[in-house]
Amino acid sequence: MSKSTIKTIRIATRESELAQIQARAVGDALIKANKGLEYELIFVTTTGDKFMGDLSKVGGKVAFVKEIEEMLLRGEAEIAAHSMKDVPTQLPSGLVITSVLPRADIRDVVVCRKGEIFTNLKDGSVIGTSSVRRGAQMKRSFPHLKVKPIRGNVQTRISKLDKGEFDAIILAKCGLDRLGLEKRITTVLEPDMMCPSVSQAVIGVECREDDKETLKLLKTINHEPTWRCVTTERRYLDNLGGSCHTPIGGFVEITKGGNLRLIGLVASLDGKKILRTRHKLGYDEWEKLADTAAADLMEQGAKELIAATL
């Protein structure tokens, strides 16, 4: 356990219950690793929280982090806790992602109304998801179902489901687990059926690049195996480009032999065309692995699919 000259570290976070749980996980990890340290949460309402329309009109995923990052740059908080899947691969000048907590369950799940069974849903049943990645894969695997956009935090989406606005919704398992809502899960979708989002199920920590004391603190909580996987995934995603309108999935896992395996996907919006890649290289060859997987998808035609969504 290390000792820091910082007594209280301010953690900027969105206001939703899930965001607060994730921020407290970061704060609790810091307290455990650093003697005498305390933390407080600084709440931020982001553009993404306020805007319930098409996110591309307000910058895409950056809408969930922009105000938080501006707070960091102004020095009003030392660190920010993020769902890493919401963090763009290119960060504002002066900010860095320094640490990640151990990854939770990467899988997506289906939540139906109580008593309903996903596989028994009738033709034309409405499935809610805010993700084009999930939507494209659902259209491919379950063409008899209708995919419709849904926005809001986890509880809001479940409320819309229970009110009958949707027959089922798709969510990340890790979010339901963290909220204690795992009993609402109807069906768990394995990665070969529903390739997860890049960096899904990972809580990351961002801070100012010139804040040496905070950088030192954050090193004490970084989970190296998760860091290696997420760093590889983000390089792979950056190589592909795309936007929040592009169905791109991918994740990296560490094999029993200690190698890295990247499994990725690029799809058309209608799910009629899905390109897949799967490569394995040594633990220290993460850059080559990311580049190889992205190049493989590009050679298969990913560039055209991505261009069609921009």
Image (spheres, grey):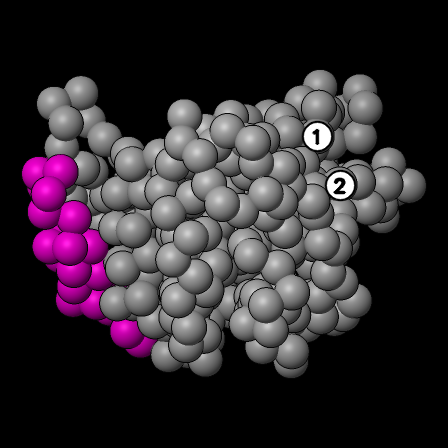
| Residue 149, above or below 110 | below
Range drawn in magenta: 281-304
Residue that badge 2 annotates:
17
Q: Report the residue at 26% width, 43% height from top.
A: 228
Q: Residues within 10 Å of mark 1 (few under 14, many from 20)?
A: some
The outermost residue toward the front is: 5
Q: Report the residue at 74% width, 55% height from top.
A: 43
| Residue 101, image quadrant | top left
The outermost residue toward the right is: 163
| Chief SS of the magenta region | helix
| Residue 162, above or below 84 | above
Q: Residues within 10 Å of mark 2 (few under 14, many from 20)?
A: some
| Residue 294, above or below 257 | below
Tell me the element at label 2: helix
Seen in the image, is 118 located left or right of residue 84?
Answer: right
Between discs 2 and 1, the one toward the N terminus = 2
| Viewer-side residue, 283 vs 29 | 29
Amino acid type of disc 1? Leu
| Residue 295, image quadrant | bottom left
Tell me the element at label 1: loop
